Amino acid sequence: MHKLFLIIGALASALAVALGAFGAHALKARLAPDLLAIYHTGVQYHFFHALGLLLIGLAATQWPGSTWLRASGWTMLAGIVLFSGSLYVLALTGQRWLGAVTPLGGVAFIGAWILLAIAVAKA
């Protein structure tokens, strides 16, 4: 399990850097300032939680059988997809209804951190 979350975390980090560079260079002149800010927020949270996935992978080297860690990792990945993904699509398409999906990703992020805390407490 630890290798899986380290790989996912590393790939998610690389994607966050690539999407951040894309936003800074390709989108800066094409998006309205409010949409660019939304995109930037997606990148920030994507990167923070990609690092969280790496943390979960490192923790799994100590507690390889922890179902709490596994749940934390998958929940954090779901948060990246729902939260950051919805913000990316919202910024690129202007479809404001996607903002309704974003809080689900935020709840997943919060849940993932709580699951991580439980995993450590139970270890």
Image (cartoon, helix red, strand yellow):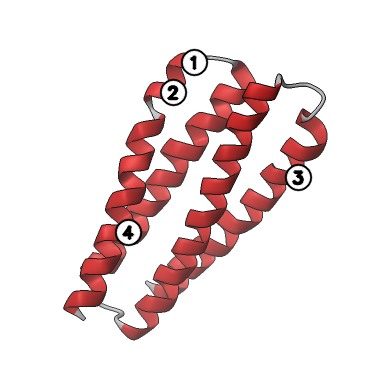
Residue holding disc 4: 113
- Most foreground residue, 90 or 15: 90
Q: Residue at x 37, y 77 (%)?
A: 59
Q: Mark number for residue 99?
A: 2
> Mark 3 Cα within 10 Å, few/some/many (few <14, many 20+)?
few
Above or below for 50 versus 78: below
Q: CA distance from mark 3 to mark 4?
A: 27 Å
Q: Secondary structure at mark 3?
A: helix
Residue type, label 3 = Ala
Q: Please, is residue 24 above or below residue 87 in the view?
A: below
Q: Residue at x 40, y 69 (%)?
A: 56
CA distance separating discs 1 and 4: 28 Å
Residue density around tag 2, few if under 14, some if 14–19, many if 20 or more, within 10 Å = some
Residue 61 visible to the viewer: yes
Seen from the viewer's position, the closer of residues 57 and 109 is 109
- The disc at residue 96 is 1
Q: CA distance from mark 4 to mark 2?
A: 22 Å
Instruction: Name the image quarter holding the C terminus.
Output: bottom left
**Badge 4, how many Cα within 10 Å: few under 14, some, many 20+?**
some
Instruction: Kindly state the secondary structure of the residue where label 2 is placed.
Output: helix
| C-alpha gap between disc 3 and disc 2 | 23 Å
Compute the Cα span from label 1 to label 3: 23 Å
Q: Position of residue 74 (x, y in %)?
A: 35, 55
Tell me if residue 64 comes above or below residue 73 in the rendering.
below
Residue 71 shows in the view: no
Kindly identify which numbered label has been placed on residue 21.
3
Badges 1 and 4: C-beta atoms under 8 Å apart? no
Mark 4 and mark 2 residues within 8 Å of each other at the beta carbon:
no
- Disc 2 versus disc 1: distance between alpha carbons? 6 Å
Proximity of marks 3 and 4: CB atoms separated by less than 8 Å: no
